[in-house]
Image: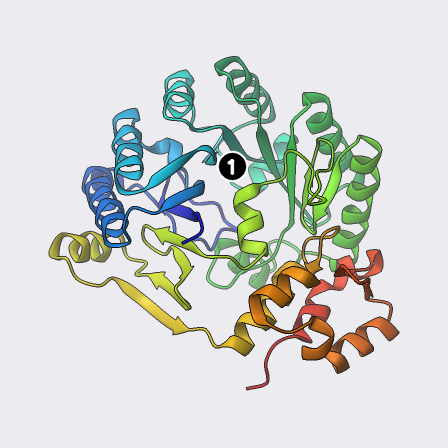
């Protein structure tokens, strides 16, 4: 079995952001102990059942992993190393909210082997942060970054959101310039979307705020491409930029190795309420309710809310859709042939011909990848590879 990736979902936050539709809950401190006990049992049990396989990346997401106590984090990592063979060179990432960290938590993460931090800053403008419901200020975000550096983190990602209603291009550029001046290794930029059943959706429906403007979002995205390119960042994925020289795999040194597993459609395990996994030809989702997850683990019962066998045709289509998100690498034809026993040109002759004619992709003997003009309309390209129902 090749080394796996592991995603762990911590479903707790100090406060739910108005735009967020992730499986997260605020005010559930009373569940922390029971949740961590169940998670630990789940990790041990799964690792033993699989023969304690090797792991090359681990990602703690959420939610906010840093709301847990240091003792909880110790228990989780003890289970990871007990149930799995975590490789010495493994990339281990934890998300962190700048408003929910302190030196003890950062020091605990470093001691436990976390070597990459992903901080949900979202903006360096206090007015935008208030609109987004964040619990930190711009100054607190800068202070959290400085603290992470002092503790020893040498690989830090910062998340930002753009396309807020009537967002000022100047404010957006100032946010990016601040991130550049901090000399962070990685940036993830996401366009604000109105998800159903969120507070933001209710605000828009009532006319309290304007709906995000896709034309403005496109302008801000292109401004980010220009600014970050000049600052030496490589845009290696539609929403992600990283510093560092390009390796033989055309990825910059500080690219997120865990997320590259997703974009290459490679196997990974998901633990925790609402987590997804793709392993052994089956995609699975864990039940979202925290209490139900705890009860199922304690009883030794299955906890899947969804199990979907993935056909060869669907796996090929998803490999194309996800791989094309990697802007420089794209879908490597030799890798595709080894995996599926056929070349992309033979599997998708009509789709590729049409997309080439529209100048939305480029093909070489080595790879298929998006053209620069296709980055803003990637979903139209990806849809071409969905198997017909």
- Residue 193 falls left or right of residue 136: right
- Report if residue 190 is visible in the image: yes
Rendering coords of residue 108 (x, y %): 36, 22
Q: Is residue 139 above or below residue 356?
A: above
- Residue 225 falls left or right of residue 121: right
- Quadrant housing the N terminus: bottom left
Which sits in the foreground, 375 or 263? 263
- Residue 37 falls left or right of residue 116: left
* Residue at position x 68%, y 53% in the image: 326
Residue with the most extreme top position: 150
Q: Is residue 374 above or below residue 209?
A: below
- Callout 1: helix, strand or loop? loop
Residue topped by disc 1: 134
* Residue at position x 49%, y 54% in the image: 199
Rendering coords of residue 229 (x, y %): 81, 37
Rendering coords of residue 373 (x, y %): 84, 59
Which sits in the foreground, 85 or 374? 85
Rendering coords of residue 117 (x, y %): 51, 31
């Amino acid at each position: 079995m090749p080394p796996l990736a592991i995603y762990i979902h911590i479903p707790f936050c100090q406060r739910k952001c108005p735009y967020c539709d992730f499986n997260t809950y605020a005010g559930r401190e009373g569940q922390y102990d029971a949740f961590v006990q169940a998670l630990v049992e789940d990790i041990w049990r799964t690792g033993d059942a699989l023969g304690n396989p090797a792991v090359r990346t681990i990602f703690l997401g959420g939610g906010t992993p840093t709301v847990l106590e240091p003792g909880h984090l110790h228990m989780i990592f003890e289970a990871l190393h007990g149930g799995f063979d975590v490789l010495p060179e493994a990339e281990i990432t934890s998300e962190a909210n700048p408003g929910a960290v302190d030196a003890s938590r950062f020091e605990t993460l470093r001691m436990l082997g976390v070597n990459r931090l992903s901080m949900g800053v979202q903006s360096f403008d206090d007015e935008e942060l208030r609109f987004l419901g964040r619990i930190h200020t711009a100054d607190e975000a800068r202070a959290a970054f400085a603290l992470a550096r002092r503790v020893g983190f040498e690989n830090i990602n910062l998340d930002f959101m753009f396309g807020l209603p009537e967002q000022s291009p100047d404010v957006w550029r100032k946010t990016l310039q601040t991130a550049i001046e901090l000399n962070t290794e990685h940036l993830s930029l996401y366009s604000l979307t109105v998800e159903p059943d969120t507070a933001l959706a209710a605000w828009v429906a009532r006319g309290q705020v304007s709906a995000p403007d896709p034309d403005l979002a496109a302008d801000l995205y292109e401004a980010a491409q220009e600014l970050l390119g000049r600052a030496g960042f490589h845009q290696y994925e539609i929403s992600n930029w990283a510093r560092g020289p390009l390796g033989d795999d055309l990825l910059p040194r500080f690219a997120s190795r865990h997320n590259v597993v997703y974009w290459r459609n490679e196997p990974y395990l998901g633990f925790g309420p609402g987590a997804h996994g793709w392993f052994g030809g089956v995609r699975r989702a864990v039940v979202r309710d925290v209490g139900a997850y705890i009860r199922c683990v304690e009883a030794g019962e299955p906890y899947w809310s969804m199990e979907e066998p993935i056909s060869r045709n669907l796996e090929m289509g998803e490999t194309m859709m996800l791989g094309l998100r990697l802007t420089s690498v794209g879908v490597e034809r030799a890798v595709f042939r080894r995996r599926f026993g056929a070349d992309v040109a033979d599997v998708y002759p009509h789709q590729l011909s049409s997309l080439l004619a529209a100048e939305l992709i480029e093909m070489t003997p080595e790879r298929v990848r998006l053209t620069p003009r296709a980055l803003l309309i990637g979903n139209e390209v990806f849809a071409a590879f969905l198997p017909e129902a």
